[in-house]
């Protein structure tokens, strides 16, 4: 197998790691969708950067990320909106520096009770994950909403 | 790693178990969507409870769950509707009594041939799974449709 | 466990294999969605067959599959459309001849920058995968769009 012309993807990331990262996202997205903003924010390193084409500037540091997330959660609650981040189509690679690069697709749905669920937007997410204290943290996140210009 | 302040998620559920439960849902949802109601129903324990905010009372026991599922499947067939339960964003935890708690998101799509596929509704599902005879069964299911009041 | 009346699904396909195939699809779908058609096409065997109810005849051979994929990618680019294949709900079985049968659901979204993301169509996909040179290839693909007649 070491002579194979193609690099087999299964040696890049173990099944254990793949499942662990799937768990990470299941928990992470649910924390946000259920308004547990502090838990969601705790998945970012203190000096994490969160860039998205929905904002003109990257958010720098957990404090700023948390502030924006709290404001967004409050707005959703005031509007009576249930938002879900349905995440999947994971592709996971280990970088040379022992970080992980995790690419996902997310379908974001929006529902007001009594109304109809809608696909609010579609985005791709590329996270750089690092391991500290026995768990994974987000060091860098790049989100692209498909419906907005890519800068 | 045992001194870590956060409980690492990877020790909670093994990759083998995580994959097994993903397989469970792939098979389970497909059985329903393809009209194999008896196979779908067979994933519930005889005394399972299925609660959903789409019904005023929980369904108690496999016989009642089966009766309702057959009626729903018949209705879809009469209406020429293809429904898909696109399930994902799994979060899996092992409870102290050796049961599993599996949380998923599902996007339910509705299509009539010649028409356009629609997002019919979004729901969250929380199952308590127990192992018997070498496989997993649903002991309790709680579904919440986002578009309906949460009781 | 060998005396169990039901075949436990976890012995059919290992977690390692399940994760590997999830990685395969994450990479495969992303290649198509990002316009890397040659990479996507390279996942098919030279004599692969790709049947879909969106075409009157199956596409036979990687060259024909590639030609059609390039044309589709060009069309999307001309129309300024971002298409995503959000794949999931995997069910994986090993066939007797050492091939794999992988069933997935895909939600295909369509977005034009400045517009709104839409669910374009829903399809089911059944692939026969074979292992060669240390990796998996598609030998046969059957796609069914829910919104089109099933032949």
Image (cartoon, coloured by chain):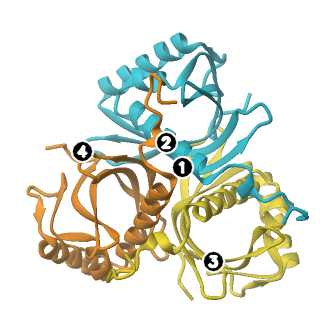
Chain colours: A yellow, B cyan, C orange
Question: Disc 1 and disc 3: Cα gap in Å?
Answer: 20 Å
Q: Which residue is mark 1?
A: B19
Q: Are discs 1 and 3 located on one and the same chain?
A: no
State the image coordinates of residue A44 (x, y, percent, origin top left): 79, 73
Is A72 in front, or is C45? C45
**Circle 3 marks a residue in which chain?**
A
Question: Disc 2 and disc 1: Cα gap in Å?
Answer: 8 Å
Is A126 in front, or is A17? A17
> Do the residues under discs 2 and 1 have CB atoms within 8 angstroms?
yes
Question: Disc 3 and disc 2: Cα gap in Å?
Answer: 27 Å
Question: Disc 2 and disc 4: Cα gap in Å?
Answer: 38 Å
Q: Residue furthest front?
A: C2
Q: Quick one: label 4, few (<14), some, or many (20+) residues within 10 Å?
A: few
Residue C10: image tag: 2
Please report the residue visible at 29 percent of the width from the left and 74 percent of the height from the top. Answer: C133
Task: Identify the secondary structure beneath mark 2.
Answer: helix
Q: Earlier in the sequence, mark 4 or mark 1?
A: 1
Q: Quick one: label 3, few (<14), some, or many (20+) residues within 10 Å?
A: many
Q: Quadrant of the C terminus of chain B?
A: top right
> Do the residues under discs 3 and 2 have CB atoms within 8 angstroms?
no
**Circle 4 marks a residue in which chain?**
B
Residue C52 found in image quarter: bottom left
Question: Disc 4 and disc 3: Cα gap in Å?
Answer: 43 Å
Task: Identify the secondary structure beneath mark 1.
Answer: helix
Q: Would residue C65 be found to the left or right of residue A124 on screen?
A: left
């Amino acid at each position: 197998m070491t002579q194979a012309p193609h690099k087999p993807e299964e040696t890049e990331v173990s099944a254990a790691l793949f499942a662990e990262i799937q768990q990470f996202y299941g928990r992470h997205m649910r924390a946000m969708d259920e308004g547990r903003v502090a838990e969601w924010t705790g998945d970012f390193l203190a000096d994490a950067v969160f860039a998205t084409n929905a904002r003109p500037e990257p958010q720098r540091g957990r404090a700023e990320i948390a502030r924006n997330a709290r404001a967004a959660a409050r707005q959703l609650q005031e509007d009576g909106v249930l938002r879900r981040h349905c995440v999947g189509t994971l592709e996971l690679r280990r970088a040379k520096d022992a970080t992980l690069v995790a690419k996902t697709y997310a379908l974001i749905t929006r529902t007001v009770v009594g109304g109809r669920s809608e696909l609010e937007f579609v985005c791709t997410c590329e996270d750089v994950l690092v391991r500290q204290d026995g768990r994974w943290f987000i060091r860098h996140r790049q989100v692209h909403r498909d419906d907005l210009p890519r800068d």
